[in-house]
């Protein structure tokens, strides 16, 4: 112990993190208040959504959004937000919440959030995250190894799949301009021939691919959507035919995005074949495994990812099928030299001399500056759950998805678009001769279920028609839950068709 003198108390003391016994007590009590409030809320939320209308929610919120100059106790504020905000939220941890790629978070991840924000490290420069920098590096190493990259593999945590896809498209663009023309986009902007550059992806690739390429100055016209087969995958023949045609037109295809788990169907483009093709043609291969990366820990289904190690860059999301609280994603590259295309030296943050001295400033690898210590969530989860259990959660959801698809196929009112789900999503339509507008009927079913709050399922568009979708991410969702939701859909459809008032 040094010669610390007692500080004089200030009006701000109770609002900052603890030092000394009183502070600790205060912190503990307030955390407990939050835990108690959440416990109450979850107990009262017996369905995935309370079913209030937008107007009702807005009205309830209006009552509590007024601010004043005077402080209120945390206790009082929690009581105020409990109804309007907490109970009107979507209960993503509910077993019958199965709409989007929106996961129930595991507790180690939730609790890590408290540590992350309490320590409030910033991942941009080593002097703001002296230990956290190396935790992130270790997590990058771990996932890069799982992908199957060599020791040259590298990466960085991101805010999610959109940012990771953006980074993939950025590096692909800059690497192509550099290798083809010796042109440095970072310094000189786009080269004259940029209008000829083309990226190929599945017509069912995530919209963030097109959005990124467009934001990167190449325009939406630079993205060539490749039609999919009946299993919703790009076919190699189609890809090579498209590339040949583009070349014939004098255009410059330079990258292919292979989706490993499309958002709607979980379908996987043929990875090995695309890797061979990209190698042969010298194209950048970006694999969007925002969804499919869940399989990296699955002992049963890891084979579905065969070939992912041959990608130049990979998108993975931990906040989808790896059960982390939002936000948590990663961008991985096969060869760390490509990340250098991003680095920019600011005197105050990551001066060149730091690099010369071997100081690791992760800002060099990121498109963000101030950045969260999300890697801690992943570390805590891997350690507390163990990798086997985490992998088996993913397997469990795949089994329930298969059950759901089979069950729907057996019922004559349903048509299943992907009867053998590749991952854990099932797309289907309720069909009825009594209805002249099947799309409208499915839209109404989804809305009515949502507003009654009994089940939260998604709707999507298939060949211009409205279909329904289950995205099963919660390993606690059972076959009984699925049956109950299917029956609820049938019941709801009959109510709508019969015009029964609800
Ligand atoms: C969700 C998703 C994305 C976008 O990821 P965010 O984390 O929402 O930014 C990208 N690609 C695929 C295939 C996705 O499913």
Image: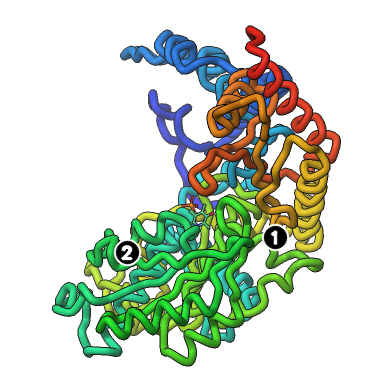
The part of the image, by quadrant, that contains residue 362 is bottom left
Question: Residue 229 or 294: which is nearer the viewer?
Answer: 229
Secondary element under disc 1, as helix, strand or loop, is: loop
Secondary element under disc 2, as helix, strand or loop, is: helix
The reply to whether residue 108 is in sight is no
Q: Residues within 10 Å of mark 1 (few under 14, many from 20)?
A: many
The reply to whether residue 148 is in sight is yes
Q: Residues within 10 Å of mark 2 (few under 14, many from 20)?
A: many
C-alpha distance separating marks 2 and 1: 28 Å
Q: Is residue 43 above or below residue 279?
A: above
For residue 387, side relative to residue 328 (left or right): right
Q: Nearer the viewer, mark 2 or mark 1?
A: 1
Q: Residue furthest right?
A: 480
The x and y percentages for residue 359 are: 40, 76
Which residue is rendered at x = 78% and y = 39% of the image? 477
Which residue is rendered at x = 60% and y = 21% of the image? 448
The x and y percentages for residue 144 are: 59, 75
Q: Which residue in the structure is indicated by mark 1? A: 422
Q: Is residue 137 above or below residue 276?
A: above
């Amino acid at each position: 112990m040094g010669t610390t003198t007692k500080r004089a108390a200030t009006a701000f003391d109770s609002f900052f993190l603890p030092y000394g016994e009183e502070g600790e007590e205060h912190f503990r009590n307030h955390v407990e208040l939050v835990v108690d409030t959440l416990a109450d809320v979850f107990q009262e939320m017996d369905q995935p959504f309370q079913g209030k209308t937008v107007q009702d929610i807005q009205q309830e919120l209006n009552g509590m959004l007024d601010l004043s100059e005077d402080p209120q106790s945390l206790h009082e504020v929690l009581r105020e937000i409990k109804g309007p905000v907490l109970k009107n939220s979507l209960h993503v941890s509910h077993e019958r919440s199965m709409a989007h790629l929106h996961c129930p978070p595991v507790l180690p991840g939730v609790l890590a959030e408290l540590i992350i924000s309490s320590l409030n490290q910033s991942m941009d420069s080593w002097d703001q995250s002296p230990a956290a920098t190396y935790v992130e590096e270790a997590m990058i190493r771990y996932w890069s190894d799982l992908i199957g990259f060599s020791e040259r593999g590298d990466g960085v945590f991101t805010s999610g799949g959109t940012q990771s896809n953006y980074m993939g498209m950025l590096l692909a663009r800059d690497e192509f301009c550099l290798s083809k023309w010796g042109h440095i986009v970072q310094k000189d902007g786009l080269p004259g021939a940029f209008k000829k550059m083309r990226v190929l992806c599945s017509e069912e690739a995530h919209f963030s691919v097109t959005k990124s390429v467009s934001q990167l100055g190449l325009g939406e016209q630079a993205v060539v959507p490749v039609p999919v087969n009946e299993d919703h995958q790009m076919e190699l023949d189609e890809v090579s035919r498209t590339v040949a045609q583009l070349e014939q037109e004098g255009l410059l295809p330079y990258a292919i995005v292979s989706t490993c788990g499309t958002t709607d169907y979980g379908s996987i483009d043929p990875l090995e074949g695309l890797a061979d093709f990209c190698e042969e043609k010298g194209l950048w291969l970006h694999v969007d495994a925002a969804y499919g990366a869940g399989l990296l820990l699955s002992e049963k289904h890891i084979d579905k990812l065969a070939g992912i190690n041959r990608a130049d860059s990979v998108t993975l999301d931990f906040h989808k099928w790896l059960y982390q609280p939002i936000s948590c994603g990663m961008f991985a590259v096969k060869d760390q030299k490509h990340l250098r295309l991003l680095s920019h030296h600011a005197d105050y943050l990551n001066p060149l001399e730091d690099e010369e001295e071997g100081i690791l400033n992760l800002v060099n690898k990121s498109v963000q500056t101030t950045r969260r210590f999300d890697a801690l969530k992943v570390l805590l989860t891997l350690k507390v759950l163990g990798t086997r259990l985490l992998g088996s959660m993913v397997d469990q959801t795949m089994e329930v998805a298969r059950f759901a698809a089979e069950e729907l196929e057996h019922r004559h009112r349903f048509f299943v678009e992907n009867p053998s789900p590749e991952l854990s999503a099932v797309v289907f339509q309720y069909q009825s001769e009594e209805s002249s507008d099947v799309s409208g009927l499915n839209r109404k079913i989804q809305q009515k279920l949502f507003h009654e709050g009994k089940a939260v399922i998604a709707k999507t568009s298939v060949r211009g028609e409205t279909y329904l979708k289950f995205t099963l991410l919660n390993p606690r969702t059972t076959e009984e839950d699925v049956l109950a939701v299917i029956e609820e859909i049938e019941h709801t459809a009959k109510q709508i068709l019969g015009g029964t008032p609800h």
